[in-house]
Amino acid sequence: MATRKKKGNSEGEGRTAPVADYRHPEATRKNNPPAKIAADGHVPLLPKAEYSYSPRLAPVLRFDPTGSADELPELLAEATRRPLNEAEAWALAEALRKHEPWLEWAGKREAKGFAVDPVALHIHERVSAQAILKVAAREDVNRSLFADPEQEYNEAVQFYKHEVDWSNRLILGDSLQVMSSLARREDLAGKVQMIYIDPPYGIRFGSNFQPQVGTRQVRDAEADLTREPETVKAYRDTWHLGVHSYLAYLRDRLVVARELLADSGSIFVQIGDENLHRVRAILDEVFGSVNAIALIAMKKTGGATGEYLPGTTDYILWYGRNQQHTKFRQIHRERKLGGSGGEAYTGVETPTGLRRRLSADEVESGVIGDKHRVFRLQIVTSQRQDRPSGPGSAMHFPVSFRGRNFSPAGTRGWSTTADGMDRLGRAERLETSGDGLNYVRYFSDFPVFPLTNFWDDTQAGSGMDKMYVVQTMSKIIERCMLMTTDPGDLVLDPTCGSGTTAYVAEQWGRRWITIDTSRVAIAIARQRLLTAKYEYYKLKDESKGVAGGFRYKTVPHITLKSIAQNTNLDPIFAKHEPILDARLADANAALEQVTGKLRQELRMKLALKQKQEGKKAITDADRRRWDLPEKGKGWQHWEVPFDTDPDWPETLKKAVEAYRAAWRAKMDEVNACIAANADQEELVDQPEIDRKITRVSGPFTVEAVQPPEMSLGDAIEVETGQFAGEPEELEGTFVIREVQMGDTPQNVEAYLSKMVDLLRMDGVRFPDNKQRKFTRLDPIYAGGRSDGIHAEGRWVNEGEADDDPQGPATVGVVFGPQYGPITAKMVEEVIRPAARRYDDLVFAGFSFDGPAQAAIEEGHPRLRIHIAHIRPDVNPGMNGLLKEQPGSQLFTVFGRPRTKVEGPDKDGMYRIEMQGVDIYDPVTNNIVDTGAAKVAAWFVDGDYDGRTFCITQAFFPDRSAWDKLSKALNGVVDPERFEALSGTVSLPFPAGKHKCAAVKVIDPRGNEVMRVHPLGGDGR
């Protein structure tokens, strides 16, 4: 996989690009099967994971303490057999009158638990942004950038047996199966620190799924519906009984999520007001109401206008696995003068000590004079629960301040001791207000305030580029993550969408796993993560890496207690107070020299200002300056003027100025001592940034669930939807339905029988519009002789005759699963036996993964292999969702990506040109010959090892995809090479260790097609 550096002199040659990512060497994961060699090894068999529902009773709102409501079902049954007596009739009437509600839904009482198949997860891609940037910068690339364990073959096929280096995970599949697999196969139970779930808010299909990568305006029209059977199945499983199946769907996932959470872990469920009350009741049931931590209300953009009040909030329910051990890191918001956290700060102190109210202009502009300090007054009394605080207690004593005595009111006591109150007074931290005494708290004492459970700054549109129809604001998930995790912790999101949780986790150095049933979501998340640019946060301990934490910005947290108990202040008081006493004596001596006439003139100035500007315009400074004490009285320390008047005698001016200078010197030293002894609060959302380094996403894998094998040997389970007692009026019993615990044999047989009938009737259409019809097609999936092949027969071109209709079968057919793609494992298992029996082999499926296509391309010298898409509306899971179409063109063969290898050139380098691809359009049911510019993305693995596709070059037609990284690395990576990453010709690369390159193309619906090119010789 090595690339060569460009020869000759060029800017940046030999330089290491200032690019880094975060790794997690302290963490490991199991060696999941690489998709291409999944058939070569053995996945340990595990029984279905059994989960029992909590025996805890569903929430019941009791209006009577007797519990007699529990007798009502029995009483109603009795009423069908005989007349009720007077007491029984009264009890029933009372119950009906009270309309006692409780959370109940169809099927809840009958189901005692559920079983989940802990499926195997196959690795399809390894992704490294660093590797792509190194190729762009003409630097060497090695597989360690992908966190590839590079195991020997015999070790690599021992799946789930070995611990390998951690890489983050983007998984395609049903969240219930994947979470159970993580818990049971990979021993992640109890190891996830945070789970974020953003389930559907409501029943509208278009509001939950996006059909194409570039389509964010989704309506409920047929053309906008996804054609992914797995996604439709997930939707229908969730809503087939309306809110009843929605609650069952959610509870099952919460039960498995609880198994994954660490004892200190948290789960967040984002929900709208429509189902908030129901979801909270389920969380109480699964986690226990004692573990409910907070209901967070967050502002959303606008609100749906209706007949009554528009809704402007969504909600997050926060529960802990064990509230007593829940990890919590307080997040703080910056105080804003006159705004959030700063509303109560209405006073300002000048450098001379004058305290006054802030003016409206000062609050509005936020401009305060130099060295002025904004403050607020707080009560300095408290009512202690741990000890007495009223009269007679140790905290109830008189305090002398500025010539007045104060005592706590009623049963309250001072917030600190007598010594503490004395220090507060001498440190100028007390102030009178009416008849009370208050503590002076400056704005700068703690310039932030704790985040509460109301988030009023989470509306979308503030600089967020929306990539997905139901994309969550990054800020919301960021806060949840920072409150409950540390760097290196593991975060899980079973509702991936556009990958916001993964994006935020990557940003903050958390490990992540995210899951979705939609290929569109996976494609969007992959691009978002691969092209993301992050700040590089400085590590607290380089030797520990990310797990050692970041270096954070800190702010002082000065408290009443920290000042009251700060004995370091005492020597400062002892030093400065004698000086102030002397300066006060000088000022009073000078005051005695002021004549009575001057005193009268000064009082006239005060009266004139009051007359002209009003009484409220008079400040304490005005009174002290112009209303001088009578002769012989003098000033106290708390009465000395803050400034002077031009008409004062020069000696008085100098004396007062000297006093204020001495006071300022004392307060500077006092404030410095208070600050030096204050606690420092880490701001966990403000780590220190190293701006010399550009950070990209760390390595991650793209994985998918191995679809369940279509077995004909299991039993079917039948569930009757009984309803018992929700206050809404519903029918008592729903139609009996089959519950598919995996693929039940009756369903499998019916599905395969339908597919064989359709294929026999319609045949297969090829890209040149030629049609091949079957003269005979027989099912062979029963009887144990199929070798994974489901049907065999003979075919001819349409309009031709079969010379030997009863002759041996020449065509074998393999059908993909109803929900899920045809995989490489399925292909590998049937090619060899098919080559012994047939000339042609058809793989017919609703989707195909890339490794399966690579395996088909390798093929067999004696076998022609064809890939045929099945029209999505014939999938039984699509019944009623799409319009019925004429019974033709049901099975359509599509080709490989049209790619061309150029090279080697004189430097031994190769290029690959992506000329286009045949894309199957499930809306029109046509194979569309699509130019290269119309694909969603295409990737190159320059040294394909035949196991896992490692993306060494990534191309997105969206020319803005790489913009942020291109600007950040200007001068290190040639901008023209970034420009090439939106083109159709790859960057040059050498033939690596495996002498093989692979190309993968992603279509707008998230489907992938793949082609492998040997390098060198005729195979180029």
Image: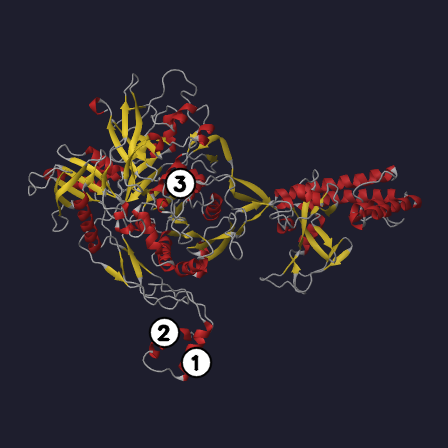
Q: Position of residue 1001 (x, y in %)?
A: 31, 34
Of 180 and 709, nearer the camera is 709
Kind of residue at disc 2: Pro
Coloration mode: secondary structure
**Residue, disc 3:** 215
Disc 1 to disc 3, C-alpha distance = 60 Å
Q: Is residue 815 left or right of residue 392?
A: left
Screen quadrant of the N terminus: top left
**Quarter of the view holding residue 106:** bottom left
**Residue at (49% x, 55% y) in the render:** 294
Disc 2 to disc 3, C-alpha distance = 51 Å
Screen quadrant of the C terminus: top left
**Residue, disc 1:** 90
Q: Is residue 862 left or right of residue 345?
A: left
**Residue, disc 2:** 73
Kind of residue at disc 1: Trp
Q: Residues within 10 Å of mark 3 (few under 14, many from 20)?
A: some
Q: Are marks 2 and 3 in contact (CB under 8 Å)?
A: no
Disc 3 is placed on an element classified as loop
Disc 1 is placed on an element classified as helix
**Quarter of the view holding residue 526:** top left
